[in-house]
């Protein structure tokens, strides 16, 4: 498992269960832990264990710290999560804290631009093929029409 996979699973497991600010603080902590360990991502992931279990511990700690108001704060966190768009919700894309969607949006635009360029190239190619086939025929028809007009005017 890589750092990106670990943090993505952790974030997905925490979303809607704790407030957004605490979620970002926890993600920042584990991201800094990876960067400061000086070991490979795989070794750190192995040491930390399953990110879902870590998320469960974070959620349980959060609920325990809120005492009898835990259900209220959990409900509030879910409402906050539902009211926030998915683009704003995903803050980690693997390298640094960049909103998710910027790469996907850029890729989508690149695909549309590429498809547009491909359509233009195909149309130009088709026009070239049509001109190569129909231009000689059209020229022959024009020559025959001109000769026909010339001969009908002459006789």
Image (cartoon, grey):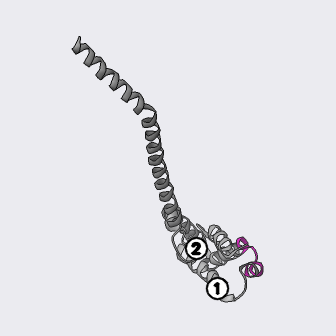
Coordinates of residue 153 in the picture (x, y in percent)? 22, 15
Residue ID for mark 2: 69
The location of residue 131, given as percent across then percent down, is: 42, 36
Q: Residues within 10 Å of mark 1 (few under 14, many from 20)?
A: some
Q: Look at the image and give the residue range highlighted in magenta.
A: 44-53
Which residue ends up furthest to the top in the rendered image? 155
What secondary structure predominates along the stretch shown in magenta? helix
Placement of 32 over or under 8, stated as above or below: below
Q: Is residue 105 found left or right of 62 in the rendered image?
A: left
Query: In the image, is residue 52 part of the stretch drawn in magenta?
Result: yes
| Disc 1, SS | helix
Q: Which mark is residue 35?
A: 1
Residue 74 visible here: yes
Q: Decide if residue 80 is in sight here.
A: no
Q: Is residue 125 left or right of residue 59?
A: left
Q: Nearer the viewer, residue 127 or 33?
A: 127
């Amino acid at each position: 498992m890589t750092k990106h996979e670990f943090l993505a699973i952790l974030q997905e497991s925490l979303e809607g269960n704790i407030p957004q600010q605490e979620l970002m603080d926890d993600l920042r902590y584990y991201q800094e832990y990876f960067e400061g360990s000086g070991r490979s991502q795989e070794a750190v992931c192995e040491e930390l264990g399953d990110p879902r279990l870590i998320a469960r511990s974070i959620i349980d700690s959060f609920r325990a710290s809120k005492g009898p108001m835990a259900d209220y704060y959990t409900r509030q966190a879910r409402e906050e999560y539902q009211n926030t768009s998915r683009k704003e919700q995903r803050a980690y894309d693997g390298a640094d804290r960049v909103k998710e969607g910027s790469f996907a949006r850029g890729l989508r635009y690149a695909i549309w631009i590429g498809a547009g360029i491909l359509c233009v190239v195909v149309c130009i190619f088709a026009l070239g093929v049509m001109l190569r086939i129909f231009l000689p025929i059209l020229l022959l028809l024009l020559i025959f029409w001109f000769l026909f007009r010339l001969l009908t005017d002459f006789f």
